[in-house]
Image (cartoon, coloured by chain):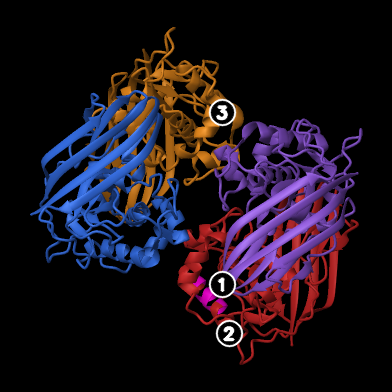
Chain colours: A blue, B orange, C purple, D red
Amino acid sequence: MTKIRVHSELHYTIGQPSSLTFAVLAAHSRHQTVLEETLTTHPEVMASRLALGPGLHELIRLSLEPGPFSLTYDATVELATHTTDETPAAEVQFGEVPIEALAFLNPSRYCESDKLGRFAMRTFGDIEPGFERVAGICNWIYDHLEYVGGSTNSSTTAIDVLVGGAGVCRDYAHLGIGFCRALGIPARYVSGYAVGLEPPDFHGFFEAYLDHKWYLFDATRMAPVDGLVRIAAGRDAADVAFATLVGAANLDQKVVSAHFDDARPPDHDAPPAVTTA
Amino acid sequence: MTKIRVHSELHYTIGQPSSLTFAVLAAHSRHQTVLEETLTTHPEVMASRLALGPGLHELIRLSLEPGPFSLTYDATVELATHTTDETPAAEVQFGEVPIEALAFLNPSRYCESDKLGRFAMRTFGDIEPGFERVAGICNWIYDHLEYVGGSTNSSTTAIDVLVGGAGVCRDYAHLGIGFCRALGIPARYVSGYAVGLEPPDFHGFFEAYLDHKWYLFDATRMAPVDGLVRIAAGRDAADVAFATLVGAANLDQKVVSAHFDDARPPDHDAPPAVTTA
Amino acid sequence: MTKIRVHSELHYTIGQPSSLTFAVLAAHSRHQTVLEETLTTHPEVMASRLALGPGLHELIRLSLEPGPFSLTYDATVELATHTTDETPAAEVQFGEVPIEALAFLNPSRYCESDKLGRFAMRTFGDIEPGFERVAGICNWIYDHLEYVGGSTNSSTTAIDVLVGGAGVCRDYAHLGIGFCRALGIPARYVSGYAVGLEPPDFHGFFEAYLDHKWYLFDATRMAPVDGLVRIAAGRDAADVAFATLVGAANLDQKVVSAHFDDARPPDHDAPPAVTTA
Amino acid sequence: MTKIRVHSELHYTIGQPSSLTFAVLAAHSRHQTVLEETLTTHPEVMASRLALGPGLHELIRLSLEPGPFSLTYDATVELATHTTDETPAAEVQFGEVPIEALAFLNPSRYCESDKLGRFAMRTFGDIEPGFERVAGICNWIYDHLEYVGGSTNSSTTAIDVLVGGAGVCRDYAHLGIGFCRALGIPARYVSGYAVGLEPPDFHGFFEAYLDHKWYLFDATRMAPVDGLVRIAAGRDAADVAFATLVGAANLDQKVVSAHFDDARPPDHDAPPAVTTA
């Protein structure tokens, strides 16, 4: 059991009446318990919480008038993370993939898995199917990409980053998802908080569906194995933006942090971040 | 009320043990009643029907051994299609879009709406928001694309077809969806049967979320307004392939048809296909 | 006859021994006479001038040691610009295009004319071939793009800008070239100095081969018809970068200007910039 | 010294008055002597030969009336091919690249070298610069691509094939060129005849500029080292199409062959095709 305190602050200047949704709430799941949380806004406004469905995340929805606006979120989260046991997780045959996971086999905006089949088979086809293969994908990505802030943008795809050779967490996750789907492994994008992230920010990683569970992978190796707090999951980053707005709002400041509750420092020498979600 | 008889036959040679899913069943919805249907396979195999969720479509899932295989589907469907009434359907403000429609605002593999904002605003920004604007998008697509069989392939996107100037039904739908989402209108891809399609095949069109309902649009003008029978809906064609397989299977023959039950011929001079779904 | 004084200064910090080429010299051509010019560097280094061939531009080539470096160029240029006369320039039939212009019919890195044929024919096919058609292309580009500094980058192509709807001078030229070649009109990219450019910088425009001459077009309408001084021509911007370097050099400052010698202000109400080059 | 007999026949049906250029003539160069050649057409028409410049290839240009048309070319060519000697060819420093080779450092339509820098440096940066590095590029391409006829088309680029993992000779050459340019090595596309090609067709390979000479490379390993007869060179395949036409002509049949004059069979176990051109 690990307790993590997460915090985010978003400060805006609203230019005209605007509608916004935020995906910053720590998710409630079997493996992640939100012990306490507070959400405050300045000025105070009515905020609805919208649940995207069982097992999926919640959004905050607001309507805002012109002027300064800030949203602050604090939570203490308990993670029942377990690392994989001795018997490595196997791939799930296509005929056994449950219907709610099928969509995560399809290509998406930033994960063009339909074009990566041959590349993925040649590069990862000889690795033992299952957990080991996805770990192999993460290792390959770690070895073949440079983490360079600002090297990519909001339209960068898995293929762009495969060719370009550099990216940020979101790009690492997209490439991992692209390779998994190309190999027939359902995979989805997860946004979250991460202990020890430098510079501090929201983080992006991914999950692969193995052995009838979603396993968490982070090819960036930027956060310790048990320091990832889930916010939202979707087909790729397009589904889990921390803020979406229609209107006019300028993000003046963003503050994000995550710490172990017992103040122990993140162990960056931990094995690659892999947990049952 | 319109009654339509639909029929599809898929003949395969299976080369090795394979898993397949099919999306060929007429959907059950408030506006589409399946009066009778039969699904047969040769040889007879166990076929499970998997429902993707309330309001979503059903898949057929099969496991097949090597040898010839065919699947035949027949249904009689009653459509409670209504064309739009005098009060044109309005766009739904972002703050009012229900949570289950939010994902249909996001860009997807074949609909890169994130790149089309400026183009869409310049081209359609002056049209009255709502039904009229989506109809304007369809008219523009009809005027600016040539319908050329074989001009595109399974990796062709909305942007490719916008630039290339030619495509098939799937491409028309993707471009319509791309423009809608770029303008803040939720839109989704629909596969189906269509009366009078020439050459006969499965058809692809799209729906836009207006006035808190999904409205059907077909920019190809290839089928009459009341001759579209829905099979499946998804973010784009990646979600609704008529067949998905893992293994080895060769599609030897595909036969698809749709007819009005009363044998009246399709009226191709009907107004552009727009119906409340 | 028009006299224009042009000036450019490039200030670098060289980090390691580096080789550079510069394309900043005013070109010598039948229609552009360089009355006087001075090129100075600090520190003084040996600079070779390399002519790319008859009718083509000259490069400056330097080898630099670490430390500050600056290059300053001043020239007074006389332009024998004539605007088109009454008989509009006709397109040159493919069988009559001289061999040295054939390469300017081929697609290039930033001008994917091979993909634009249908779009170009539908949009410009009904315009009178020749000068009028290319002017029509420029007008269309002017109407359909927004000039937005920083909206594109060094990998943006004609298709990107057609879809994205915004760009800078380089993008306007690439799109014009792409449409021309798609219609069978040889077209090439030209870099230069431009009177009245705001903000001052190097400029990019293009030439189309009509009536056995190269005609100058500037779809941006940012400089007066007789205020464009040619530096270099190539297939697209890839061929005419103002500086190319191998090594490590940081561009600290760039100063560019162009003025009519008689101090008259640029006439921005002049007709679209079109001149025989 | 090697003698090779080459042959090509192109049979067309011309639908309307058309202009065509052909690039099928064996090139004349220091290392390739055309001992005899015949060019015949049915019906007989005036064909001009156009030289693209010193060291470059010649085109045939024709105007044709509707009806059947065929062009037949036969030549006997003597190659003074030498394989590299003991001292491996070194890379040429940027400051020493002659002006006529500079353009072959720039990205082109099918060789987006501007996007491949990081990938190329990571993959080939540790190989000894010069001949060995380009050979390493060819070996990597051979190992990482599958040769699959029909897997690509006329708009496929180096990046497409890098990601897609399959292609034909043209694609192998484009990727080789892309990597070379990304590493600062001038590289150009060469079309030609190749002994022992299966199935027989025109062939595409590339040259890299090393040690102040152009060295020939063929990453496909489909033809023996001394069996490549050059037709044309250019920035990429866009520059050297065997036929370019404006009008309407249908290519009914294409026959291409190349044989050693002494009837010895091609030695497919020869080292990778590398020759001084």
Within 10 Å of disc 2 (Cα), the crowding (few <14, some 14-19, many 20+) is few
Name the residue nearer the viewer: D276 or A40: A40
Q: Is residue A33 magenta?
A: no
Query: Which residue is label 3 attached to?
Result: B122
Name the residue nearer the viewer: B177 or A27: A27
Amino acid under disc 1 = Thr
Circle 2: element type? loop
Query: Which residue is label 2 attached to?
Result: D270
Amino acid under disc 2 = Ala
Q: Is residue D139 magenta?
A: yes
Residue A11 in view here: yes
Cα distance between the residues tagged 3 and 1: 48 Å
Circle 3: element type? helix
Within 10 Å of disc 1 (Cα), the crowding (few <14, some 14-19, many 20+) is many
Callouts 2 and 3 in the same chain: no
Amino acid under disc 3 = Arg
Dot in front, 2 or 3: 3
| Side of A47 relative to C11 (left or right) | left
